[in-house]
Amino acid sequence: MNKIISTLKDALPFAMLVLALVLIFVPLPVLLIQVLIVINIGFSLCLFLSKFFSSTAIAYYFPRLVLYSSVYSCGIAIATTRTFLTINTLDGHIPLVLIIGQWICRENYVCGFFTTLMLCTSLLLFCKLHVERSQSLAANFCLDRMSQMLLDINRQVEQKYITIEEGNDQKRKVEAESDYHCSMDGSAKFLIGTIAAFAVLFVVAAAGGTSVGILDLNMYWKDALNQYIMLSSGYLVLFVIPLFITSLGFKTGKLE
């Protein structure tokens, strides 16, 4: 059983890479995209709820799961952008996207464009100033005290307060806690990069959609801007909200 778990753990990064490539390069129907978006939101909720559990296994794998979730979100976002650029009518889009986009834009593409960018900027600042900073401080504090803790353990072993086996066990716990906080710091930085990538993707999708509307669908430029900024805003919110939920799952507690 341990060999099977180890094999699955080693194969998971490759599987996620293959899945991301499939999402990017293989055209997907709208119905499948809806299912993938629901899975993405559900997985983000699971990561958030993991904050309330004290399981060491959950805490240990949390940074890796955040990384996989971000790669998965990027793959879906690119696949969704390609798909929505090929849809000629509003009826072919996800109804929830239309509702969110119309609520944000209010038939004003300028308002919708800057409101969506403001949402991304706010989330980016939240993750930068709160999530990343707290994880970075925890990692630096853990690294600073690790050498002193290892010296204290060696001193206790030399003075026969603890056995060599107990000392090695305590050293492994100290190193595991250090690795945990460093991984959390890295996953927080990766999450920030994903949000920034979504902001860039929103601008690209809005510009590309407007070009498609004007050149291929013979739309008036204001109508094209209004429609595709509305759609880009709706899709972006569906991808940014799960990242925000995931960011709330970060914690600075000690690895038990």
Image (cartoon, rainbow, N blue to C red):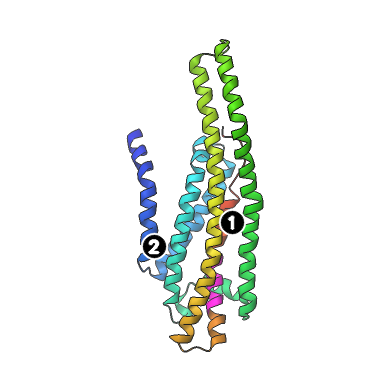
Q: Horizontally, is 161 left or right of 205 in the view?
A: right
- How far apart marks 2 and 1 lie (CA) works out to 22 Å
Find out whether residue 233 is within the magenta segment.
yes
Asked if one can make out residue 104 in the rendered structure from this viewpoint, the answer is: no
Q: Which residue was labeled with disc 2?
A: 23
Looking at the image, residue 19 lies above or below residue 32: above
Packing grade of label 1 (10 A; few <14, some 14-19, many >=20) is some
Kindly state the secondary structure of the residue where label 1 is placed.
Answer: helix
Name the residue located 36 percent from the left edge and 61 percent from the top edge: 22
Q: Which residue was labeled with disc 1?
A: 244
Span highlighted in magenta in the image: 228-237
The image quadrant that residue 32 belongs to is bottom left
Question: Where's residue 250, x and y in %?
Answer: 59, 46
Is the Cβ of the residue at disc 2 closer than 8 Å to that at disc 1?
Answer: no
In the image, 55 versus 130, the foreground residue is 130
Packing grade of label 2 (10 A; few <14, some 14-19, many >=20) is many
